[in-house]
Image: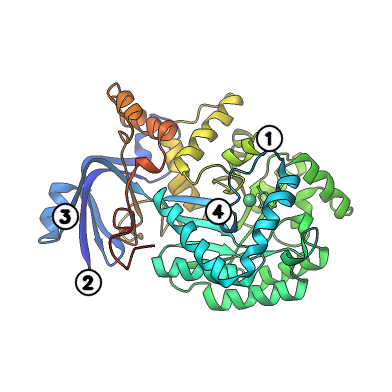
Amino acid sequence: MTQRLLRGRLLTFHREPLSGEDSGAYTYLEDGALLIQDGIIQDTGPFTEISAKAGDVPITDHRPHLMMAGFIDTHIHFPQVQVIASWGAQLLDWLNNYTFPEETRFASDAHSATMARAFFDQLVTHGTTTAVAYCSVHKTSADAFFTEATRRNMRMLGGKVLMDRNAPEGLQDTPQTGYDDTKALIADWHGKGRNGYVITPRFAITSTPEQMAMAQALAQEHPDCHIQTHLSENKDEIAFTKQLYPQARDYLDVYQSHGLLGQKTLLGHSIHLEPREIDALAETGAHPVFCPTSNLFLGSGLFDHGGLSARGISNGIATDVGAGTSYSMLQTLNEGYKILQLQGLALHPLQAFHWATRGNACVLGLEDKIGNLDPGTEADVVVLNARSTSAMALRMDRVGSLAEELFVLQMMGDDRAIEEVYVSGAPSKSVSGQNSETNF
Ligand code: GUN
Ligand code: ZN
């Protein structure tokens, strides 16, 4: 039995804050404690209370830093670690010129394994303890992804992309091989340890109707798997999709008519939506995923978080690396804030930090496991330092509230603000490079 007591300022959310004044939505303790046993949070509360009950447990004192649940990234591309920051193109050219050629390299086991280690290093360094990832079309890339997730004991979701047209030869499967590889990956990885498999038709343009039908079969055969794809990111993409699926009522109908919409469905981008599509999202409970740095980088458009939320649709928020320009969920919230500002919405920092933690956990239906610090949940914790750069420290000298501190972290923070990360209760950032177990 491994026990550890973390001491520090502690913030955890119980529900989405309705406003900045909604103090019932969260617990904040100036001197808090988390008692962790075998990767699970056993107890939480004021330090004096928890330490008195805990007895002789080793204590790590993180004061004056802020402990909260690890960040959750609901849309990211593992084979794009060497695509991030590729110049000058919008979606379809960016895919053809940069992304697809790079993804062909993941046919190699060795390359997939090396990049998986690098990818997980980036996640942990940036405070992300759970991500929902697209792997490449190659089965080997998904094997490498789940092998690395298992080695680190991280709660990760992902899947190999299904794509059988409009891509280079080395980056296509067939309806049958895509189905067979997905079945094998589900059998090998889904529900093993903390892994979850995500059925992943990349998007309408790269899947024939025959492949969409296979994705439908997979979804029916594995209703406990999530589904992820891309929707209405870019106007040229939408026009091409309508040519390829002339019977579809609109872009979303390509997925809806194949039975792919439900509460476990994640739809990256969902920017340029028609009224019928919004109705269908509300009816089916599928989740749009807002990718602010990506949407600005590719010039894709402005996600309508306010409009969709008003319809009762719950949106994820995510980096979308490699079109996204940072692994940091802090930087993602920063750019997200600005996109909402352009639409007359001021996202409160308490709502922003809820979104990147418990909010994204709810989108995934995993709020009983991750995204908060309740007893019984998995001990994925991030420790944040709002004075991690001299510019932040200067600003912090004039800060007088938790909300202001969170906003400084959101606008100015990045991996330097991540003081420590606990994955399943084990310190995973500071020890990197110090022992063989965690020397990634
Ligand atoms: N649409 C289909 N594939 C991709 C991808 O890899 N990135 C982005 N941003 N959009 C996509
Ligand atoms: Zn994407």
| N-terminal label among 3 and 2 | 2
**Residue that carries the numbered disc 1 in the rendered image:** 301
Horizontal placement of 273 versus 392: left or right? right
Would residue 158 be seen by someone viewing this image from the given angle?
A: yes
Q: CA distance from mark 1 to mark 4?
A: 23 Å
Q: Position of residue 200 (x, y in %)?
A: 65, 62
Q: CA distance from mark 3 to mark 1?
A: 47 Å
Q: SS of the residue at dot 4? A: loop
Query: What residue type is disc 4 on?
Result: Val
**Residue that carries the numbered disc 4 in the rendered image:** 81
Nearer to us of marks 1 and 4 is: 4
Q: CA distance from mark 2 to mark 4?
A: 37 Å
**Residue that carries the numbered disc 2 in the rendered image:** 1
**Residue that carries the numbered disc 3 in the rendered image:** 59
| N-terminal label among 3 and 4 | 3
Query: What residue type is disc 3 on?
Result: Ile
Nearer to us of marks 3 and 4 is: 4
Query: What residue type is disc 1 on?
Result: Gly
Q: Quadrant of the N terminus?
A: bottom left
Residues under numbered marks 3 and 2 in contact, where contact means CB atoms less than 8 Å apart = no
Q: Residue at x 32, y 36 (%)?
A: 388
